[in-house]
């Protein structure tokens, strides 16, 4: 099996019924990593994988809708399963928030600080990150699978960010599309659907999966607006969807 992406949740900013916040399971034949772990996604994760088979957690930034279920994972691994030193990659700011919510980080978790541009390896997957345009230190993530296939995840970003060099020609781009139109978006540091399409087109990626839609949005409208800008296949993420990269 090459690299696959399973959507655990894809709601932007807050969860909705049956639609947890951001969380994605990455799998190859030998490696399993969860990328972001927002509210509701730890429960979804357990539909797809035994927690004992999880190799690591990668968190893109400190906004709670992208990580708070790490607290549940920590309790399960440390107290129920007796597993310590779960590998977590994230920002220093995020580490501080986890420490504030939990009585301790060590020994349950082993925190690795994300450094822009510095590659790291988990099993047979290679990761590299790039800072986006957002309110806190936020890392887009480029994942390279065992066959050289590449997935890029924008995490959260404003329209000033480009992935032209970071992820040029990636096989699959998972890009935030918080609102359908620029008018709905206003001046917040997120993307409208046309921004997501333009980001993908400019970087020459092969496929686009829209995510982080704020609940209430019309997924078909997002896809239509992004498709007007990006010529390749476009879909909107939904919980449980699996994409082979
Ligand atoms: Zn954010």
Image: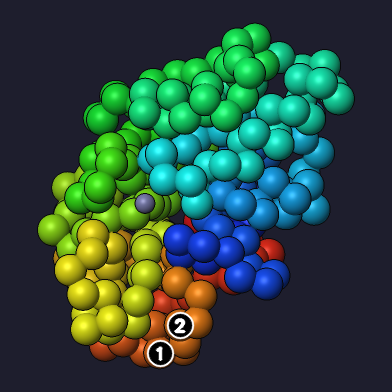
Q: Residues within 10 Å of mark 2 (few under 14, many from 20)?
A: some
The reply to whether residue 24 is visible in this rendering is no
Rendered location of residue 108, percent (x, y):
67, 16
Q: How many labels were placed on the picture? A: 2
- Do the residues bearing badges 2 and 1 touch, measured as CB atoms within 8 Å? yes
Task: Identify which residue is drawn at 47% across, 30% down.
Answer: 97
Return the residue at label 1: 221
Viewer-side residue, 27 vs 24: 24
The reply to whether residue 67 is visible in this rendering is yes
Q: Residues within 10 Å of mark 1 (few under 14, many from 20)?
A: some
Helix, strand or loop at mark 1: helix
Using the rendered view, name the quadrant where residue 13 is placed. bottom left
Using the rendered view, name the quadrant where residue 85 is placed. top right
Task: Identify which residue is drawn at 20% across, 50% down.
Answer: 133
Using residue 42 as the reference point, say whether residue 57 is left or right of it: left
Return the residue at label 2: 217
Q: Nearer the viewer, mark 2 or mark 1?
A: 2
Task: Identify which residue is drawn at 47% across, 87% down.
Answer: 218
Measured in 3D between alpha carbons, the distance from the residue under mark 2 to the one under mark 1, in whole angstroms, is 8 Å
Viewer-side residue, 77 vs 152: 77
Cβ at disc 1 under 8 Å from ligand 1: no
Rendered location of residue 78, percent (x, y):
76, 20
Rendered location of residue 71, percent (x, y):
64, 34
Q: Is residue 143 above or below residue 13?
A: above
Viewer-side residue, 146 vs 203: 203
């Amino acid at each position: 099996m090459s690299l696959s992406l399973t959507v655990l949740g894809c709601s932007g900013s807050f969860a909705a019924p049956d639609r947890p916040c951001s969380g994605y399971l990455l799998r190859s034949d030998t490696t399993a990593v969860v990328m972001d772990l927002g509210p509701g996604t730890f429960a979804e994760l357990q539909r797809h994988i035994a927690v004992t088979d999880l190799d690591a957690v990668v968190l893109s930034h400190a906004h709670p809708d992208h990580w708070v279920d790490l607290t549940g994972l920590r309790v399960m691994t440390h107290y129920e399963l007796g597993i310590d030193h779960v590998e977590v990659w994230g920002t220093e700011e995020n580490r501080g928030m986890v420490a504030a919510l939990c009585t301790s980080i060590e020994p349950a978790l082993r925190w690795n600080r994300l450094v822009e541009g510095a590659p790291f390896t988990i099993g047979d997957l290679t990761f590299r990150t790039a800072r986006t345009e957002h309110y806190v230190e936020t890392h887009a993530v480029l994942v390279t699978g065992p066959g050289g296939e590449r997935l890029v995840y924008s995490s959260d970003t404003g329209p000033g960010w480009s992935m032209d060099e970071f992820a040029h020609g990636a096989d699959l781009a998972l890009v935030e599309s918080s609102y359908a139109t620029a008018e709905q978006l206003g001046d917040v540091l997120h993307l409208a659907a046309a921004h997501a399409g333009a980001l993908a087109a400019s970087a020459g990626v092969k496929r686009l999966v829209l995510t982080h839609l704020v609940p209430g949005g019309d997924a078909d409208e997002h896809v239509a607006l992004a498709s007007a800008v990006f010529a390749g296949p476009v879909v909107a993420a939904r919980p449980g969807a699996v994409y082979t990269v």
